[in-house]
Image (cartoon, rainbow, N blue to C red):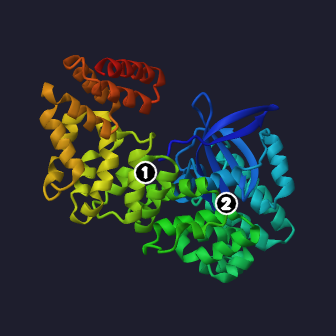
Amino acid sequence: MIEQQQNVTVISNQRPVQLRVERLAIHHRMKILEAVKSNGSKFYLFFYKDDFITGKTVDVKNGSLIEKAFQKGIVLQAPHPLINHFLADRTLLLKSTKQVFQSVQKHYTPQETSFIFSYFDSFLSTDTLIKLMRKHFYEYRRNGQLRKAFQILAILLHFDPTNKWAQELTRKLEYQKMRSFYDVEDTELREVDPLYSEILAYNELEKNHMYLESLFQKDKRTTDLSALRLHLYLHSSNQDERDPLTIIEDSLTESESALLLWNMYDEAPQHKILREKAFQALMYLKKTSEAINLLTARKAAFTASESELLMKAFHEEETDFTKINLLLLQDCLRIKENRVLLEGLLHTLIPRMLNEYGLTYVYNWLKPLYEGNQNLAILSTIQTMVEIQDNPDKQFQLGKLYHKLKQYDEAITCFDWEMELHPTDPTPVQWLTKVYREMGKLEESNTYMSIYSKMQRISH
């Protein structure tokens, strides 16, 4: 994953508290954001559709709906552009449990209230939640609203499938007609109980995606819509050939697009289009070492555009060569189809490798590339450098070759040696003037320029 931190701020007791976001689960109509406090404890933020409900420090219980949301829902790992868009411009004010209960009861139907509170089963007892749902059930039944009473039973059984009280009630004759809608799970149920239909639709996302997409578009739940499309794109049995960015409902910046492409590839590395897009994304995000490893892991011929990006990656200061898999890179450079690109790639690569590993290592690493490529000037240069590196009479020549490869410190060492060996020869002094100037060390360059000028006057 890309190492970027994603944060969210909540207001607790009139004070802002910053949390580090870890992931977001989209499960039925709920969104649950898992974050971490400064002390390392997990903190969960609950949303119904797009509305913030509450936040709690929670030890997630086994079998709870929080756990199921992260196991069976659509999960976005932070950092993720969709999480950014979902949290943008929000003030998340934490309330007490009593205030939350009053607010939810005021703004949502009893069915929605029962559904929302069922996700609090890691910090509210099962008895408390069942008691709330039974209260709503009996209110509806007393008023003769059997359809709405049955909807409460359906939510209760979604929360607690083994609840005998609810099971027995659903089998009663007075609910036979209602039960028939739930047994079939067809389009009629979507009219009779939209909330429960949405719950059921999540069991088969691919089969029900058109229905869910229509709901999300109607409710303007763009995060749900984009996340669903991404999930199906990544997990469909048939690889989608579309540009993955075209399926996103949100408008993304270039940086967000690059991050999204990398996240998608990280989740589905077998996806051909994502592999191609991810390399470009990593380059944009300046994760150049990862980009090189991604490209070379294919062990395939490079396209011209990939070759250009690869040379750019070799050249970038951010590229950490200690993180590059050099064996994979070597294998790729040996591929016959890549020979036409080899000289340009090596001209950019070798100076960076010399900086990191030195001449002897680079020569040994290049040995497999000499076969069939003896005509390449850069390989001949390295060969010559290895042959003369220990010859005291060839240090001036070696220095010029180091200079050609922008290995300025090594070039200076060679020219210093030549100066000591031939103290009256102005040529190595002239080269030292040149090297220091190219390094931006003007004071040293001017010093050697003065020495050179004085030697020139003496020689004449």
Residue 134 - label:
none
Residue at 54% x, 56% y is 258
Residue at 69% x, 49% y is 46
Query: If you read the primary sequence from the N terminus, does the residue marked by circle 1 or circle 2 appear first?
Result: 2
**Residue 392 drawn at (x, y percent):** 14, 25
Q: Which amino acid does label 1 sit on?
A: Lys
Residue 194 vs 346, above or below: the answer is: below
Is 187 left or right of 73, judged from the image as shown? right
Label 2 Cα crowd, 10 Å radius (few <14 / some 14-19 / many 20+): many
Residue 312 - label:
1
Residue 156 - label:
2
Write down the quadrant of residue 169 in the picture.
bottom right
The mark closer to the camera, 1 or 2, is: 1
Secondary structure found at label 1: helix
Residue 166 shows in this picture: no
State the CA–CA distance, disc 1 to disc 2: 59 Å
Residue 450 vs 41, above or below: the answer is: above
Front in this rendered view, residue 440 or 152: 440
Write down the quadrant of residue 37 in the picture.
top right
Q: Which residue lies furthest to the front in this view?
A: 460
Q: Which amino acid does label 2 sit on?
A: Leu
Write down the quadrant of residue 341 in the picture.
bottom left
**Residue 293 drawn at (x, y percent):** 35, 50
Residue 183 vs 332, above or below: the answer is: below
Q: How many numbered circles does the render carry?
A: 2
